Amino acid sequence: MKPKTISHPKLSTNSYNQSGAVLIVVLLVLILIMIVGAIAVRQSTTDLKVATADQVNKLLFQANDAALLKVEKEDRILSADSREKNDTLKGYMSSSEREGHKVSFCVRPRSTKLFSILEISEVNRNDALLTAKNNGYCNPEDSNDYVSEGRVITQMTFVRPESTGILSQEGSGTSSNDVEPATTGVNAAIGCTTFIGYVTSVIPALSNASLGDANSSGTSSIAGCFKQSRTGTNTVDSCLTALSVPYQTQQQTYINQPVGVTCVSGN
């Protein structure tokens, strides 16, 4: 018997070429899918950052607005009580002793009063801190100094500018000229004063900056930033900006104009 010869089919080179082409196409499709996915993820991350920034700004604005409304409401209520007038923010800042001074205090939701002369930090016209009044600056390490469910720290500072002229605190109906106005009786000049309020809210958790504590100073921590000046080169705002801390500051001007008196000057 003759042995049978078995022939094996030969694979053509065209089959190899077709398989290689399919593989390349699949790889290109996978690369395109990865690129599209990466772009989508990047876009969603950007949208999330924008949304987060908007939420942060709203939270900070609400904290500032709430502090201003609260201190103004508290001042109106206490001013109506003759026993409390000397302890009001308006009464304290309108005193001639406050001229050129800066008074700061932290918004502490657990305190019975937002403004209390026992919980303030006061700087005189020479930028010297009064040691007897140094209990107002916010301490980021103290949970009692946080508002908005423990996420935001809010500090208020009220600045009494120095008088700019002889009429700066005079009410209408009084006359300076070369005569010293009366200080008692029906002809007494009624003082008209202006002071500027600053309120700053920050969210420490959204930064990598050092918190600091009640003893911190300088510009390397959030607590130290709160102790900076409100005017000039090195301010609270410039310090927080340098530390990349999310913050927002609002400014409000107040005029202490007694009832029935028209102030000659705004200061």
Image (cartoon, rainbow, N blue to C red):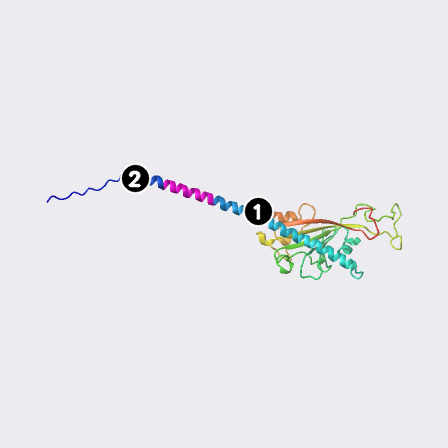
Q: Quick check: can you spot residue 225?
A: no
The residue that label 1 is drawn on is 50
Q: Which one is nearer the viewer's eye here, 93 or 229?
A: 93
Residue under the point 44% across and 44% down: 34
Is residue 36 shown left or right of residue 76? left
Q: Which one is nearer the viewer's eye here, 174 or 54?
A: 54
| Image quarter of the N terminus | top left
Residue at the extreme top of the image, as rendered: 14
Residue under the point 52% across and 47% down: 44
Res 117 label: none
Q: Is residue 36 magenta?
A: yes
> Within 10 angstroms of label 1, few (less than 14), some, or many (20 or more) residues?
few
Q: Quick check: can you spot residue 29?
A: yes
Rendering coords of residue 17 (x, y %) = 32, 38
Which amino acid, by three-letter code, is at mark 1?
Val
Judge depth for marks 1 and 2 and give the one in front: 2
Please determine whether, in this image, residue 111 is positioned above or below residue 4.
below
Marks 1 and 2 sit apart, C-alpha to C-alpha, by 53 Å
Rendering coords of residue 151 (x, y %) = 61, 56
The residue stretch that appears in magenta: 23-37
The residue that label 2 is drawn on is 15
| Magenta stretch: dominant secondary structure | helix
Rendering coords of residue 50 (x, y %) = 57, 47
Q: Earlier in the sequence, mark 1 or mark 2?
A: 2
Q: Which one is nearer the viewer's eye here, 30 or 199?
A: 30
> Within 10 angstroms of label 2, few (less than 14), some, or many (20 or more) residues?
few
Residue at the extreme left of the image, as rendered: 1
